[in-house]
Amino acid sequence: MKLRLASYNVHKCVGLDRRRKPGRIIDVINETGADIIALQEVDLRLGKRPAALPLSLVEDQTDYHVPDFAPDSPSLGWHGQAILLRHGIDVTEIRRILLPGLEPRGALMADLVRDGLPFRVVGVHLGLLRRYRLMQMAAIRAAISTRKAMPAAILGDFNEWSSRNGVAPFAEAFRVHAPGRSFPAARPIGRLDRIALSDGWHLKDAGVHVSALARVASDHLPVWADVTLSADG
């Protein structure tokens, strides 16, 4: 089974021109060609956190469906995050993971199946301080360890500037890939957006999605990884 995994911090749909345009975020998401894409900053940090990226837009203009991690919220997701799945990828279970830190953070865990093969995807947006990022990664590892074992991928904005350090809690069980410079979008210098793969995944290619639209739609560029998954690992 071949999949394209991706992550995209959409910056509340506010572009580098300071205009909030959810429609062009949808266009960039479609440009990536991803089968699964983890999104960050999909809602507004006000009151009940209304959606910056409306579910109706996703349903009308993409081939994705969205697991409902927050059924009582107007947001597309939870703690500003969502996971979009290409139709044909089925959800068997979802779970929310509260993360430690000074500011409210959470991770999304989805157990999925496609073509009879089960796998797990975790969407993350880690904190700004490394001390808390390390605690958050440890909490995610602990949450994964309590579930049925299956190939897992962690997608998101790791907020880690170092290309060598800062991901130790993941490194024991995951290969952490920084596909390229993705922040800030106009002239990227930081590899903040990453994809971590457990055993069972085979990385074929990875990169940063760069287009004229992506360079202005958000302050991050999307990152992607082409992977395969087989029944025998």
Image (cartoon, helix red, strand yellow):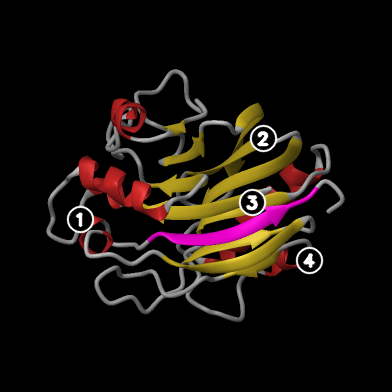
Where are the magenta residues, as a range? 222-230
Residue drawn at (13%, 55%), measured in percent from left and top? Answer: 18
Residue drawn at (83%, 37%), measured in percent from left and top? Answer: 148
**Between marks 3 and 2, how big is the CA–CA gap?**
14 Å
Counting other residues with Cα less than 10 Å from the Cα at mark 3, is it few (<14), some (14-19), or many (20 or more)?
Answer: few
The one nearer the camera, 8 or 225, is 225
Q: Name the residue under label 2.
A: 112
Principal SS element in the magenta part? strand
- Which numbered disc, 3 or 2, marks the residue closer to the eye? 3
Using the rendered image of the protein, determine whether residue 149 is visible from the camera's viewpoint. yes
Amino acid tagged 2: Leu
Residue drawn at (52%, 45%), measured in percent from left and top? Answer: 35
Residue 201 in the image: state x and y as whole percent.
73, 57
- Which numbered disc, 4 or 1, marks the residue closer to the eye? 1
Residue 22 in the image: state x and y as whole percent.
23, 41
The image quarter containing residue 117 is top right
Marks 4 and 1, the one that precedes in the sequence: 1
Answer whether labels 3 and 1 touch (C-beta < 8 Å): no
Farthest residue toward the right?
232
The one nearer the camera, 171 or 139, is 171
- Which numbered disc, 3 or 4, marks the residue closer to the eye? 3
Amino acid tagged 3: Lys
- Identify the mark at residue 15; answer none if there is no mark: 1
Q: Name the residue under label 3.
A: 2
